[in-house]
Amino acid sequence: MYLTPSSKYYWVRLFFQGKYFTKSTKSTNLVESKKFGIKFYEQVLMNSVITKTSDSNKSFTVVGRNYLDSIKPTSVPTVYRNDESRFKNELSPFFNEQDISTITNSQISRLLNKLTEKDRSLSTLKHYMVVLRKILKYGISNDLIDKLPVFPKLNGKTRTTQKRDYLTDEEYDSIVRMSEVCSDEKLVVRGVEITLEMKYLIQFMVNSFIRPSDLRVIKHKHVTIKKEVKDEWIVLSHPATKTNSNEVQCMIASVGIYKQLCELRLKTQKTISPDEFLFFPQYKNRDTMMTARCRPAVTRSDINERSISEIHPKIPKIIRPDDVDVSILC
């Protein structure tokens, strides 16, 4: 640990494998700087292990790194980053240079105990086991080990910190009905007029199972209407926005909703281009579209604390408060 005339922060320096490693601690406290120095030392040691590239080495860290390198070109970026994070943060430091063929059930159990002591959730523990199993299977495929060790069973249910909210059938019907009222009244929320396109968006999302993030990318060229005897339904083939790009089979009602959307669009333009976005194509910046069109205006708690007239004077008084609650939330 040392100070320099050009900086108020403590610096840490260490000599390893023939060269120096230096880094600022970004702290003026000596105790905190020493803690930082220890972590920096451990990180340098771990990185030196992870960067080894000998294919003939059967150490867990080298095999794990080779596995990650092999899947990187074909993996979904988010999935790859999650797997790599599990490997670098816990799996590699735990098994380190151990021969991959000597990993046992007892060691895997100790790993789980260590992660449990860090208050990792059950779903996180399962993900660590999935990544570990992938690496060991890679070892089998490359004749580095003969068989997988027996994995300990994980008992219990996954816990979530917050349950996902949802709408009842009555609330959904209320949203659709209120979106029509808002359109008829030409209601303006945060400078944006509510039109029938919002109604079709709500109905289409429910009948196609898409995520809000999918609205950024779906274009008319991604929509295919399939027919079988008397039934018609839509198949979506838009790019992946979260996990995969599998085709989406929509409900039968999605066909009528899509046709109504096209009829609405053709009232203001002559043709619809296949490369035109399905919803709110006037927004070339799709992040702006999501912000302007899809963010909540008022929460349920707001409705409970404020009168209908305070929310917007154009809301008809004959509408029940519950209806306004759901529509404005949307």
Image (cartoon, grey):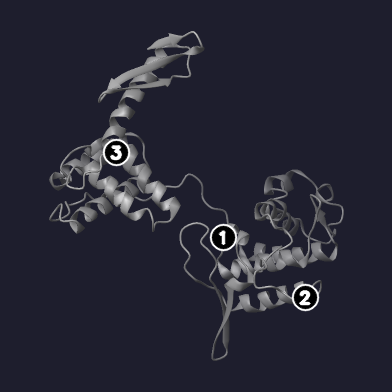
Mark 1 is on which residue type?
Arg
Q: In which quadrant is the N terminus drawn? A: top left
The mark that comes first in sequence, 1 or 2, is 1
Counting from the top left corner in percent of width and height, residue 328 is at 73, 54
Q: Nearer the viewer, residue 120 or 136?
A: 136
Please indicate, yes or no, whether residue 155 appears anywhere in the rendered image: no
Q: Which residue is mark 2?
A: 266
Residue at 66%, 62% in the rendered image: 171
Counting from the top left corner in percent of width and height, residue 84 is at 36, 45
The mark that comes first in sequence, 3 or 1, is 3
Q: Nearer the viewer, residue 226 or 55?
A: 55
The mark that comes first in sequence, 2 or 3, is 3
Mark 1 vs mark 2, foreground winner is: 2
Q: Nearer the viewer, residue 99 or 151?
A: 99
Are dots 2 and 3 in contact, CB under 8 Å? Answer: no
Q: In which quadrant is the C terminus drawn? A: bottom right
Q: Which residue is mark 3?
A: 51
Are dots 1 and 2 in contact, CB under 8 Å? Answer: no
Mark 3 is on which residue type?
Thr
Q: Is residue 210 above or below residue 310?
A: below
Q: Assess disc 3: are there few (<14), some (14-19) or many (≥20) residues with their C-alpha within 10 Å of its C-alpha.
A: few
| Disc 1, SS | loop
Question: Quadrant of the rendered structure where residue 219 is?
Answer: bottom right
Q: Is residue 41 above or below residue 92?
A: above
Are dots 3 and 1 in contact, CB under 8 Å? Answer: no
**Residue 187 falls left or right of residue 297:** right
Residue 211 circle label: 1
Q: Assess disc 2: are there few (<14), some (14-19) or many (≥20) residues with their C-alpha within 10 Å of its C-alpha.
A: few
Q: CA distance from mark 2 to mark 3?
A: 58 Å
